[in-house]
Image: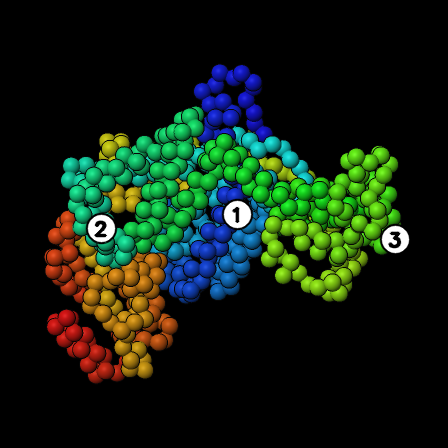
Amino acid sequence: MTKSAPGSASFYPLERSPFTFDLRAVGLFRILLALTILFDQAIRMGDWDAFHSAGGLVSLADSRAWDNAWLWSVYWLSDGPWLPYVLEALRFVASIALLLGIRSRLAAFTLFVLLASVAARNPLLLQGGDKVLIVMTFFAAFLPLGQRFSMTRLWFAESAGTRYRSAATFAFAVQVLLVWFMSGILKTGEEWWSDGTAISMALHLEGFTSEFARLWRHWDWLVQPMTLFVFWLECLAPLLLLLPVLWCRVAGLVLLVGLEVGIWASLEVGLFPLISVVSLVPLVPHRVVDAAADRLRARASARGAGLVLFFDRDCRFCAFACRLILAWSGIRGASLREAQSDAVAAGILEESFAWSVVEGSGQRGDAPADAVAPAMDYRRGWEAVLFVVARSPRPWIGRLLPGPAAGERLYGWIGRRRGALGSAGAMTLGRGNARGWHGGAGRFMASAAILVVLAWNAVTYPPLHQRYDLRPAVEPLAAALNLKQLWTMFAPHPYANDFWHVMPALRRDGSRVDLLSGRPVSLEPPRDGPDRYGGYRWRKTVIRSLQRDEIERVFRYHCMTGRWAAFDLWEFTRPNLGTAATVEAPYSVVRAGRWQCGDIDADRVAAFRRDVDAMLEHG
């Protein structure tokens, strides 16, 4: 752990530096990061075949040629059908390991490789949140993720303070804050500056707007000043977080979290707000974490104080099991002692080969030094487990445990195999507690990566590359690290047109439905955002395919499923005026594509299309 010398005159002393992370905040961040990745994986699984399988929307050959030649993906190692399934299983295992704090840095790096590979495998559906997740996971792999709230900490029982500063914390903080800062300074359109209509334009995109935003988006008196507020917030709030002043950092965090909550409530943009908020957790100041920890500690210590757990000092797994029980039950006031240090506990260990628990210190505070608690006060074996859980501030835990008879059998089974369990624990969690990549190689990698990121953000800034295009010099490095990024959410300006799509489809059984949503075809503007498209990733896929004039790949994929006979794609569009008058403007209808699958009865298809044309004409 890096510490500043006492009395240091540094502008960023250890305690106040925004680059000094609290290890408790880092541990919480690790848990939230793992849960977010698992949530994202669960969402993707609904359309896994379309997005990630070998026969999906984007072929392996197309994905290899999509971007820079230096870009990589482990999905490209094989054209066979089994590799994607293996990688998906590996991603799940790595996410669980990160969640539990098992080999956390290795798990984080594995997840970075897999997330970056998935992004390169199918860039058609990528959202801004996906890129935030990738770069955040990369720099997180250099942090001491397992030092708090982890199985690793319970196994090693080491405590090295709560402050941590290194090149990795600097790189992580800079990368996270760049997302907002670059998003702000890239908003160069007049809608953000002179007109003040950018927020209103964003909220009048029917395919993105939430029901909550529809309640107030017509309040021009509010959305126009809010446009300037959002612009300056994105530019200045990250700078507040870099000041060594507590109230400035707290204000910066509150503003950025408030912005993401506002985006979540107003626009249906997938996991981007959630991922952005999670990325801010390590930046929470120490004094805020200390205050929260003191309050939680006081509540947790109220019950279970005075409990003493005795374990066999020759059994590393036994000490780990005691710490695990206390952590799971939420008891913080108990203490651990070696059974050999207490006469009664040593007798129980020798007689029953079991751990024991007593209420009190084992030594009465006002009793002679050689006075010990009566043997009848000691609980042993499974009875001791239930005794501890009964004093937990989490009473629901007791309902999850087996009863006395089944519990004793389980306890006996574990006791007979504690040596093997100890060896398995050492193999899984390691024999030496790595607190982070502290060596020169780690510092060099984190420092080099953030320099590449800063250079790439600089050379992609339009006023610079329009005069001196240095992107070809930096792009190979950024692509090789899979850290290419461009934070252009509604930048330089929002969409100039409000648009949404309908995809009438004819099934092979003769039934008709909107292929995207799976519902009856509706010509009304969407009020359910991504649901009209079958999910926010399908929305991005359709929009990006149309922008690239490659909508045929969407048609071809649905034909390959064997369920469809023919379908059309129609785009409804109108000028986005950036005012309440937008909703009064009529839509124009454009046919964006028409497709027929294989050898289908031409008369059925012709009748289907006549009906679609008639519906659109009178709709």
Spatial distance from mark 1 to mark 3, Cα to Cα? Answer: 41 Å
Separation of disc 2 and disc 3 at Cα?
A: 73 Å
Q: Is residue 167 above or below residue 281?
A: above
- Asked whether disc 2 touches disc 3, contact meaning CB atoms under 8 Å apart, the reply is no
Instruction: Give the class, few, some or many, for how many residues have Cα within 10 Å of label 1's Cα (few <14, many ≥20).
Output: many
Q: Is residue 81 rendered to the left or right of residue 574? A: right
Question: Residue beneath label 3, please?
Answer: 351
Q: In terms of depth relative to the viewer, which is nearer, 123 or 340? A: 340
Q: Label 2 belongs to which residue?
A: 216
The residue singled out by tag 1 in the image is: 31
User: Are dots 1 and 3 in contact, CB under 8 Å?
Assistant: no
Disc 3 residue type (three-letter): Glu
Q: Secondary structure at mark 3?
A: helix
Of labels 1 and 2, earlier in sequence is: 1
- Name the one closer to the observer, 13 or 179: 13
Note whether 50 is above or below 191 in the view shown: below
